[in-house]
Amino acid sequence: MVKFAECNLNFKELIGNHPRDCEMFYHLIPPLGEADKTFDYTMIPVLCVQVTLFPNSGISIGVTNHHCLCDASINVLFLKAWTSIAQFGNDESFLANGTLPMQELKCLKKSINLTNYVDQLIKARMNPPIPTAYFGNCVIGGCMAMEQSKLLMGKEGFVTAAKLIGESIHKWLTDKDGVVRDIQSFGDLFSNGIPTTTMGVSGAPTLKFYDMDFGWGKPKKVEVISIDYIGSISMNACKETHEDLEIGISLLTTEMESFVRIFEHGLEAYMDSGLSRFSITRSSCLMTIPLAWTSIAQFGSDESFLANGTLPLYDRVVKNPKLDESYLKYARVEKFKEEYQSHKLSCGPTDKVRGTFILPRSVLNKLKIMVSTQLPTLEHLSSFTVACAYVWSCIAKTRDDGLQLFRFIIDCRARMNPPIPTAYFGNCVIGGCMAMEQSKLLMGKEGFVTAAKLIGENIHKWLTDKDGVVRDIHSFGDMFSNGIPTTTMGVSGAPTLKFYDMDFGWGKPKKVEVISIDYIGSISMNACKETHEDLEIGISLLTTEMESFVRIFEHGLEAYMDSGLSRFSITYSSCPMTIPLSPKYRHRKRWGATTHLLRPFVRINPHALPSDTIPAPTREPQEIMALTLLEVSHVSPPATSVGDRLLELTFFDFLWLREPPIHNLFFYELSITQTQFAKTIIPKLKHSLSITLQHFFPFAGNLIVYPTSTQKPEIRYLEGDSVAVKFAECNLNFNELIGNHPRDCEMFYHLIPPLGEADKTFDYTMIPVFCVQVTLFPNSGISIGVTNHHCLCDASINVLFLKAWTSIAKFGTDESFLANGTLPLYDR
């Protein structure tokens, strides 16, 4: 389903880097839709899109997909195809250059074992490697760094965190036995205790979401909405240069205030001399909008994407009956029909704010020098390691939660033996690369160094693990033998995803937001828009936490900032952090939120939707934000281009059956009216999306979950199935939304489409996996909110999809995408 909408929110506010209300983004993200529960199975939509116009400012494209559909790399592959086809008007370019999804699973039809749950793509880690175009999930969540927060809070907290993360990553990268092992004892992972806080990383700099160009330029901003609720940060390569990292964080307002102070204070010593001590700019990222879409949207076809992109690989190369059975039990499919409820973003007060922090390459290098000086033997020390470590140590100082767990995704494609193709469609990531530590060790003077040590060691362990990233778990209790973590953090996205490259033909995104961090407990990380060498980090915290975080963040960076900058020159759009946030408006915010809150009022055309879907306003109209629904479309692949298809899921996908969907939000700065939006943007996006879906058919399908474990869940596409795309208009301040100051999280939720309700029958439960909402901010811009079920695919495939879409949108065909892209691999 594809929704088209117009929104009156401030486009520039949404794409900013200051703390902003998380809920603002949720209006731009489409829900997947309700599951169809029958006696035989449960059928769930897996993909939906919402394109939102901000009149005369820009548009946003929100994409929602079920995680069982595919992992991030396939999402990127899909987006590459879509953008290529949108650019050229057909899929010729995409087919010539892209990677089509792999449709067979020969590579994974072998016995593999699983040890730790790691959120990293492991296609290349399999033996033999899985093709990159493999369609589905090929990630696992077991690369972890764990430490007591007190060790992360001290002077050496950053170094400690870097050590933990670096060692964990190194372990995984050097594991000679591969990423897949029998799971013998899950408990060993937590032998030092159960983390009280778990963090993860959503996305990766390599995904390059800012490259998603539908033909009107790259995104102004990319947001990973999912970090609002999954406990992760988002990470992406920056829009301007892929060497910088963009990190998105969603925190409670109070947490964000503390985080900002801690974050920036800690970086003062690393800032270049030409910069003010607190002049750090911030923008956030999303990692799950496919590159195919932007390519197709730019060119009007998928020709460009097919020429230059990578089509997804649908081959199921990760088959393992033992692990399938184990993970189906974990997913409790027998009770799935009764227990499954469509995840909905709350557009009411959340007491959280959203913000994004930029860590320039110069600062990252100085942080690495500091860690290497104190830990000369640390084997894995990267920009990712020190960025994660610094944020972790700042959050530890903000919360003082006790035992804290930091976790991040590992892509298993290259880790499998043989490796899985990069275009493998689906999920091929695991989330078990973890670092655990007592918060008091992260809060002290050495907290950053402690965090760097934990993260570095864990990453090194995973990268060098000879036995692979997937093993049998023998004992769950061993993982937390030292206690249960009170705080868990993760990272959503990665600098390699490069979301700021997503250009549908009207330019790159002005801002990218990972909405999911509001509820998954993660930070987002992305390469910055201006340079991919800088990192953009998104955080969502409680208002009080954000106030503390800002102080801690900025104070910690003072030693690293260039001497030419004023200590307190940092501003946050219309909301300077020096102005206390009113208790009346202490809502959950993204890094970049205003001190005021406009409660949303959704105005819907009664002819567009059933009357029972019209929500009641929560305040008087003159006090509330208006979201006018302009059109609801259902976009299908071209008739007879796909036929009825089934894509069986693997154990990589089963992990995400019960997880909330992923929400991503792209802001584009465009000065257009509602009439121009209806005549140019809407037709272009629908046409290019249709061509993109021809190559990424699972996005238009539904997740089918059967009531017994004897029938594996699958993604089913039947001729005529479609993606729901909403088009709306919003009156929120666009510039406020794209800012970097703390902004109420709930503002964003109006821009995010829900997946839709599940259709529960006697035979199965059917759930939509993908939807889109495009929202117009008149004369300011548009937002594109994307929601997808995590079972659909992982981040790399989401980026591939977005590259395809932007290419096709730019050129009007898929020729460019086929010529240069990578088609997905559907082989299982």
Image (cartoon, rainbow, N blue to C red):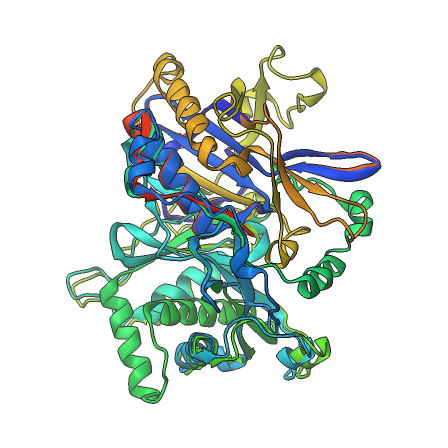
User: What is the tally of numbered marks visible in this picture?
Assistant: 0
Front residue of 258/403: it is 403
Q: Is residue 533 above or below residue 663?
A: below
Question: Split into 4 quadrants, where in the image is the N terminus?
Answer: top right
Residue at 26% from the left image edge and 61% from the top image edge: 360
Q: Position of residue 669 (x, y in %)?
A: 31, 31
The location of residue 600, given as percent across then percent down, is: 56, 29
Q: Residue at x 18, y 68 (%)?
A: 563
Report whether residue 522 is seen.
no
Residue 513 pos. (x, y %): 43, 45
x then y, percent, for residue 726: 52, 25
In the displayed structure image, the side of residue 701 where residue 371 appears, left or right: left
Q: Quadrant of residue 218?
A: top left
Horizontally, is 296 left or right of 107 in the view?
left
371 w.r.t. 52: above or below: below
Residue 122 in view, yes or no: yes
For the residue pair 19 and 523, the one nearer the viewer reads as: 523
Q: Is residue 718 above or below residue 543?
A: above
Q: Is residue 153 or residue 375 the one in the foreground?
A: 375
